[in-house]
Image (cartoon, grey):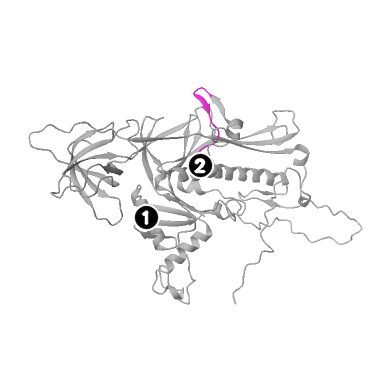
Amino acid sequence: MAGSLQATPGFDLQPSSEQVALSTNYITNFDFLNQYLPDTYEKEFERYGNRTVSGFLRMVGAEMPTNSDMIKWAEQGRLHTKYVDCTSAAAAAANTATWTVNDTLTPGTGGISIRVGQTVFITDNTAASGLSNKAVVTAVDTAAGTFDVAYYEATGQAVAAAVDCTVMIYGSEFKKGTNGMVGSLEADDVIFDNKPIILKDKYAVSGSDMAQIGWIEVTTENGATGYLWYLKSEHETRLRFDDYLETAMIEAVPAGTGSGAEAALSSASAAGTINAGSEGIFYAVENRGNVWSGGIPSTLADFDSIIGRLDKQGAIEENVLFVNREMSFDIDDMLAAQNSYGAGGTSYGLFDNDEQMALNLGFTGFRRGYDFYKSDWKYLNDPTMRGDLTNGVVNGLLVPAGSTTVYDQVLGKNAKRPFLHVRYRASETEDRRYKTWITGSAGGAMNSDLDAMEVHFLSERAVCVMGANNFFLFEG
């Protein structure tokens, strides 16, 4: 009979960081009538292991400086022209017709990108109708969004009037001794921007408490040890700030017009008003990328639909899946089921498992159309962060590997940039990537009459998600 995971005792979410000294940090039982001395473990036990969640951006991106309140870049548009909402007023079997483009017209021109002499493929949008034509363009009214065609087929127009069709340009054809192509096309760039946000933190301890030794030998994830409790608190403040530098880049959103955050955080600059907030990774992918919702893709058919979408985007050869534990296991199970001996559960992997080999039930990657590499993302599993949520669940993020070429408007030239990278404010005199300084009159600082040591942390940064159409966000 199968058992189940009991609700209690569960995991502890009580934070250990407080703004006051905890009674649990010091011995309070000084009863001299008790003749028995307790046997104490001096060293603090690390029951939650490594508690930090940062590291994701260090694996997939880079950091580079910027010296502006606004970061702008241009991304390439499509190379070829295709309209998917076109109708003809001509009846079926007509040798010529006027077609109207109902798609959103070319930005900035309000017209269409079809020219006289080009050859087009016209197909019915109705599923399984099998109706299509090929034709040459004989006239174009760019402003009105219409063009005239003459069909190659002797049977004339295949579809009836007012049927919704797709038009694709595939070439051109001209008579002998005629003039060249009329008109030219300009490259269609899409301009994106983002702004950095300022992050701060502080740790303060009085001079008297700095001289107070504790009885517990404390330690932190960065290796700091000692019997001075304030050292642990200062190091944990630093670790917490390091995590927030990353999680803020993941979760940041721009402040909406008229929102409370806009009123509280927006500031004036020489160029105008700089609104609050920034575009984090999740926000950028939700608005400019691809989103899988309603569960976890756990079958090959699910991944085939994902691959089909990637084919329609940049078709990046290598992609990394950063996933939570549930999605990781579902992918493992999906891949294991493809093995002919998968029912036994013991033979999948790089080699056949034998009795002397540790059973490996996990996969680090697979290839189906593209290469997919899988990595656990601690941020999505940690119960104090994105893990264990009821709503707003994110199961994973697909990040394309490599870099892309964009036009950097600050540099004024094309530059290769990682799809995902962080820009921090810096100049020759001020570097705001990671600032830390000490104020007060304790701990070596002698710059004020405050009988304390205050450790300040500051960073100003933004994340740039370039080619967001190549990313996939897997929501619950």
Mark 1 touches mark 2? (CB < 8 Å): no
In this rendered view, identify the residue nearer to me: 22 or 224.
22
Q: Which mark is residue 220?
A: none
Q: Which residues are magenta?
A: 269-280
Which numbered disc, 1 or 2, marks the residue that appears first in the sequence? Answer: 2
Label 1, secondary structure: give it.
helix
Give the labeled residue for mark 2.
280
| 271 magenta-colored | yes
Distance from Cα at disc 1 to Cα at disc 2? 25 Å
Give the labeled residue for mark 1.
307
Report whether 149 appears left or right of 13.
left
For residue 381, say whether it is visible.
yes
In this rendered view, identify the residue nearer to me: 394 or 340.
394
Quarter of the rendering occupied by the N terminus: bottom right
Circle 2 Cα neighbour tier, 10 Å, few/some/many (<14 / 14–19 / ≥20): many
Label 1 amino acid?
Ile
Q: Position of residue 304 (x, y in %)?
A: 37, 58
For residue 83, say whether it is visible.
no
Q: Position of residue 194 (x, y in %)?
A: 47, 35
Label 2, secondary structure: give it.
loop
